Amino acid sequence: MVFIYPGSFDPITNGHLDIINRAVKLCDKLIVAVGTNISKKPAFSVEERIELIRASVGENEKISVMSFSGLLVEFAKKHNSNIIIKGLRAMSDFEYEFQMALLNKQLDSELETLFMMTSVHYSFLSSSVVKEIAINGGDIGGLVPDSIKDRIIKKLYCSKNV
Ligand code: ADP
């Protein structure tokens, strides 16, 4: 079975990585799909976001990271998947995810959206929180994988303060 885990991953956090590591155990192949058609301007380019995910995930032949634009239902079809994985944090995620899941179901009745509950220690964590802390020179240790921490700080803090 092929699972698709879509998101903006701007940048990937330990909350995302936790979902990836748990979801990959349940499928044959997991595609992390980095959205390119989002209205808010991302801090990291698609290439940078993909690179940060690859560096976080490490070598795992079951995981592919790629960009996607257009409709998720079409992307899923193209990759022979009918399962979308989403992470759920607080109630605030629910309303949006509920709407998206029903909308995708409307577009393709074969498509299922599965929700995975956040791990309790990541329930507060989002890419926006990471960016806010990094831009202001705070410590993002424990919030993002160690292997990409310096790259995030370099991009968001150092480039602002030169
Ligand atoms: P955000 O910008 O809010 O971090 P993304 O679009 O990158 O969100 O998120 C992609 C998916 O990962 C969504 O399903 C989102 O709910 C999930 N996700 C994000 N952060 C976490 C977390 N800390 N724990 C569990 N799921 C998460």
Image (tube, rainbow, N blue to C red):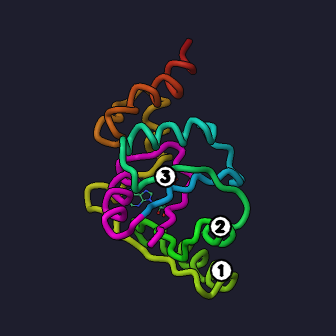
The C terminus: image quadrant = top right
The secondary element bearing badge 3 is classed as strand
Of the two numbered discs 2 and 3 on the same chain, state the one appearing first in sequence.
Answer: 3
**Residue at 51% across, 65% down:** 4
Q: Which residue is mark 2?
A: 78
Q: Amino acid at mark 2?
A: Lys
Image position of 127 with respect to 152: above or below: below
Q: Tell whether 4 sits left or right of 120.
A: right
Any atom of ligand 1 within 8 Å of the CB at mark 2? Answer: no
Asked where in the image residue 145 lies, by quadrant, the reply is top left
Q: Earlier in the sequence, mark 2 or mark 1?
A: 2
Quarter of the picture holding the N terminus: bottom left
Q: State how far apart marks 2 and 3 are (Cα).
A: 14 Å
The one nearer the camera, 60 or 88, is 60
Are the residues tagged 2 and 3 within 8 Å (C-beta)? no
Please tell me whether mark 3 or mark 1 is closer to you in this view.
Answer: 3
Crowding near pointer 1: few (<14 within 10 Å), some, many (20+)? few
Question: Quick one: label 3 or label 1, which is nearer the N terminus?
Answer: 3
Residue under the image location 28 percent in, 40 percent down: 142
Residue marked by disc 1: 103
Residue 58: image x %, image y %?
36, 41
In the picture, measured across the screen, residue 56 lies left or right of residue 35, that is left
Q: Which residues are magenta?
A: 1-28
Check disc 3 and report the residue beneath it. 64
CA gap, disc 3 and disc 1? 25 Å
Name the front one of labels 2 and 1.
Answer: 2
Q: Secondary structure at mark 1?
A: helix
Residue name at image x 65 percent, y 80 percent: 103
Amino acid beneath label 1? Leu
